[in-house]
Image (cartoon, rainbow, N blue to C red):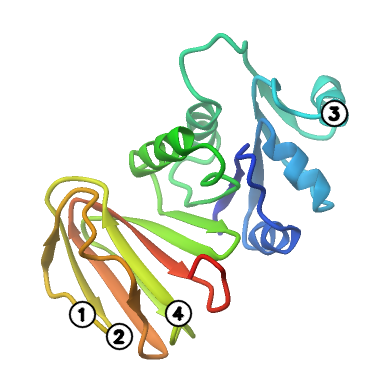
Amino acid sequence: MPIMIVCGSPVVAAPDVLIDAAGRSDAVVAVDRGLDALLSAGLSCDLFVGDADTVSRDARALVDESRLFEVERFDPYKDQTDLALALDAVGRRWHGADILVTCACGGKPDLALSVLGQLCRYRSGSVSIMENGFEARILHGGMTWSMTKARDRRFSVIALSDGAVVSEEGLEWELDRFELPLLGDQGISNFVTSETATVTCHSGCVIAYLFDEHSPLA
């Protein structure tokens, strides 16, 4: 099972999303304000990473005590983002781990793009994302995402690098070793037409999104 990383986006995943993700994970890492998201869902973490500059007073007290979980705390005047530091911590503690990331993709567009950059550079294991209304996978060459019980859900795939070549099956518009342009729109707003659909990245790096059937994002 993966390591869950709860980031500090101001758009917080719903408690049921956090509880579901935590149930799929071997350990939980809170990234700064992500600790408040966990506490609001009745959860805690195994490791806190960050400068604690955006956490609540109650969360900061827990960080200061350092009794309930491990803490890697940094000066706010640092060169790396809290997520970059968290990924480094995961690599040191759970080398080769898959990661499941949440509370990472909303609120601040510049930070959201930075998150995608950090996650596409994580190559020690697979990268999954769970948020309100969608789940996603970052795929590198040779990786496949098989989606089950996904009929009628909206699907998109976007290249995060040059030379991204993908194939898709079980979708309304299928691709066969198609090269997507960097951040292009050829892969967006597709629909799953079978109980099982797959997207394969043959080269480069892409992010694939599967939206909830009743999500306003769909």
Label 3, residues with CA under 10 Å away: few <14, some 14-19, many ≥20:
some
Residue at image position (68%, 39%) is 34
Q: Earlier in the sequence, mark 3 or mark 2?
A: 3
Q: Alpha-carbon distance for marks 2 and 4? A: 11 Å
> Which three-letter amino acid code belongs to the residue tagged 4?
Arg
> Which three-letter amino acid code belongs to the residue tagged 2?
Gly
Q: Alpha-carbon distance for marks 1 and 3? A: 50 Å
Could you say whether the residue bearing mark 4 is in a helix, strand or loop?
Answer: loop
Could you say whether the residue bearing mark 1 is in a helix, strand or loop?
Answer: loop
Compared with 44, 85 (above or below) is: above
Compared with 198, 22 (above or below) is: above
Task: Determine whether label 4 and label 3 are within 8 Å by CB.
Answer: no
Task: Determine whether label 2 and label 4 are within 8 Å by CB.
Answer: no
Label 4, residues with CA under 10 Å away: few <14, some 14-19, many ≥20:
many
Q: Is residue 102 left or right of residue 171?
A: right
Q: Is residue 120 left or right of residue 55?
A: left
Label 1, residues with CA under 10 Å away: few <14, some 14-19, many ≥20:
some
Q: Which mark is residue 197?
A: none
Could you say whether the residue bearing mark 3 is in a helix, strand or loop?
Answer: helix
Q: Which mark is residue 153?
A: 4
Q: Which mark is residue 170?
A: 2
Q: Earlier in the sequence, mark 4 or mark 3?
A: 3
> Camera-side residue: 105 or 129?
105
Compared with 79, 22 (above or below) is: below
- Mark 1 highlights which residue? 174
Residue at image position (24%, 75%) is 168
Count of numbered badges drawn on the protein: 4
Q: Give residue 24's position: percent from left, percent from top.
A: 62, 62
Q: Which one is in front in this view, the residue at disc 1 or the one at disc 3?
A: 1
Residue at image position (52%, 37%) is 108
> Which three-letter amino acid code belongs to the residue tagged 3?
Leu
Q: Which one is in front in this view, the residue at disc 3 or the one at disc 2?
A: 2
